Image (tube, grey):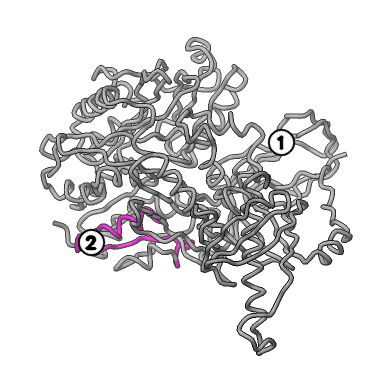
Amino acid sequence: MFKKILIANRGEIACRVIKTARRMGIATVAVYSDADRDALHVEMADEAVHIGPPAAAESYLVIERIVEACKQTGAEAVHPGYGFLSEREAFARALAEAGIVFIGPNPHAIAAMGDKIESKKFANAAKVSTVPGFLGVIEDADHAVRISDEIGYPVMLKASAGGGGKGMRIAWSRDEVAEGFTRAQSEARSSFGDDRVFVEKFIVNPRHIEIQVLGDKHGNVIYLGERECSIQRRNQKVIEEAPSPLLDDETRRKMGEQAVALARAVNYDSAGTVEFVAGQDRSFYFLEMNTRLQVEHPVTELITGVDLVEQMIRVAAGETLSIKQSDVHLRGWAVESRIYAEDPTRNFLPSTGRLVTYRPPAEGHHDGVTVRNDTGVFEGGEISIYYDPMIAKLVTHAGDRLTAIEAQGRALDEFVIEGIRHNIPFLSSLMQHERWREGRLSTGFIAEEYPDGFSPLHVEGENAHVMAAIAAAADHVMNERKRQISGQMQTQRPVSFERARTVMLGAASFEVMLDEADGALLVRFEDDSAHAHHLVSDWAPGQLVWRGTVDGEPVACQVSPILNGLELSWRGARTPARVYTRREAELARLMPEKKAADTSKKLLCPMPGLVKAMLVAVGQEVKAGEPLCMVEAMKMENVLRAERDVTVTKIHAHEGDSMAVDAVIMEFA
C-alpha cells in the first residue's frame, strides 16, 4: 500500500480524499494556487505545495507542476478527484513516465471513454443502447446546423471533453444551433483546452440515471446500483439520490450489466460512472462514461457501505476487489443536495465573497438517519471567482425515500450561511415540492416547475402559523431573559405579564395569546382559538437555529437578529418577524414603508464577473430579447439580454472589466 499520495485537486473533493487516506494511514500532499493559499484542503493535508497563479490553466491544469510536486514530496501516487486533470489521458501517461501511480483508470480506458465521441463508438461496438447522433467532429456552426437538420430537433450540443454542464447547449431550432455551437465551443476551449463539440438527439422529458462501476487490474468489474440525477439546472446536477424511484429490479439489472459490459470492453480498472438518459417508460440510452469519481458518489457510498475512494486507492495499488457482485446490496435511501454560492432568485447566477457565517448541520447517525456534509470551505473563508461555486454536498440517508427527504429538509433548514448568496432556500423549498416527493422527475423539472425562476416562498397557511408561533416563542424567551437583567425583578417569576401579542411576518399580522404548560409554550391564534400550538425548545438568544418541536413534529428554523425583531428562514421561506404588544403593533402600522430605487432603465451586472464582450453601442436601438453583453463568471459565459425595447444611452463598462454584483453596465432610454 502507498505511504504517501498527492491530491491533484482542491475544495471539497480534495478534503474528501484526505479523510479516507488518513483513515487508511496514508500521508497526503495538497497542491494549491495563490487563491487557495489558506484553503481547507491545504490545512488538512500533511504537506502542501504551491503550484501557481489563481487561474486553473496556470496551476491545477499544468501537468508538469503536479509531477514536480510529487517528486518534491516523494508522493507515490496521485488521486485526481474530479474535474481538472481527472480525465486527461496525457496526465495519466505523464505520471506513469515519472514512475508515479495514477489513482484512476488506465490511459487506454480514459482515451476510449473519457472522450465523449470515442465512448459512443465503443458503446455501439459493445451493443449498448445509444442515443441517435453524429459521432464525428463538427467543423463549424454551419456543419452543426446541417447535422441537426438531419437528426431532427431538439438536439444537444456537447463538448467532447466536457463535464459539469460546461460546453453544453440544448437547441430547438437552426438559429439556436448556430449560436449554441459558438458558445459551447468557447466554453469547452476555456474549461478543458479542447474545443471539439458533437451533436446528439435530445430526448424530451428524460431522466438522468447513472450506474456506478468499479473494476480492478485483474479483470473484475461490478456495478454498485444507480443514482438518479434528474434535478438539474443549466445541465448541471443539483439534487441526486440513490436508488432511483423510477427503476425496478429488472431495469436496474439490465442497466448495470450494460455498464459492466462497456467497462470490460476497455479493461476499466477503477471507479467510473456510465450515464444513461432514461424515458419515463424505463427505456434507456447510453450518454457517456465519466472515467473518474463523480461529485455525487456519497449517495452510492451510503446505500452500499462501500468507500469508493478507498477502493480506488486499493485498486491502484494492485489489490483485487474484495467485493463481488453478489455482495452488493442496496440499503435504504440517500439524498444529496449541492450547496452552491449562487443566487437562485437571479436565475442561479454565481455569487462570490466571504463566508461571514458557515454553520452546517451536525454530522452523524441518530434515530435511523445519517447526515453527512462534504465540504472544502470554512467560516471566514472566501468563495473566489476562479473556481466552481460549490460550497458543500449535504447528504442524508434513511430507511426509505420519504424519511431521507424529510431529514434532508431539516438539515437544509439548519444550514446557516451568511455573507454570500446561496441556493439553500431553493433546495429547502424543493424538499417540500409535491412532484419531487412523489418521484415524478425529469431533467426539465426546474424549468417546468420554476419557469420564471425561483422566488422565495410566500409565508402563508399552516407554514405562516408555525413561523409566527416560533417568532412568539423566541420573543418570549428573550423577554424572560430581560426580566432577569440586573435584578430588576427579584421574584423568581413576574407576578403577571401581558400575554397578548401581535406577530408581524412582513406585512401579515397575527394576533396570538401566550401561555405555558408542562414545559411547553402554548401559542393560541385568535383566528383559531380552539387550538393551541405546543412548542418545546431549549433555544437561547444568540443561537442561529431554533430547534424544537411544534405540535410534536421536529422543526429547525433559522433565526437571525434584525432591528426590532428576527429574520426567520424555514422551508425556503424567509421573512422578517416582529412581535409587539397590541399598542406597539398599532403604532408600527403607522410607519411609512421604504421604497426601492428605480433601476428599470439600467442594466445591472447580475453576478460578479468579467465583461467578455460588449454587443451594443451608445445610441443603438435594441429589441426585447436581443443580446446586450456577455459576462463570464465561474468559467460560464452568460449573455445578458434586453427585457424590453430600449435605446442605449450610456455604457459604463468595457470588455475586460471586472464587475461587482449590481454594478451598472449600461443605461437606457
For disc 1, the neighbor class at 10 Å (few under 14, some 14 to 19, many from 20) is some
Residue 27 lies in the magenta-colored region:
yes
Residue matched to label 2:
23
Picture disc at residue 615: 1
- Of the numbered discs 2 and 1, the one sitting upstream in the chain is 2
Query: In percent of the image, x 35 and y 38: which residue is there?
Result: 242
Q: Residue 454 appears at what percent x and percent y?
A: 63, 40
Q: Residue 538 appears at what percent x and percent y?
A: 51, 68
Q: Residue 261 appears at what percent x and percent y?
A: 21, 25
In the depicted view, which residue is nearer to us: 625 or 198? 625
Q: Amino acid at mark 1?
A: Leu
Magenta-highlighted residues: 9-38
Viewer can see residue 608: yes
Residue mark closest to the camera, 2 vs 1: 2
| Numbered disc 2: secondary structure | helix
In the depicted view, which residue is nearer to us: 468 or 59? 468
Query: In percent of the image, x 83 and y 52: which residue is there?
Result: 597
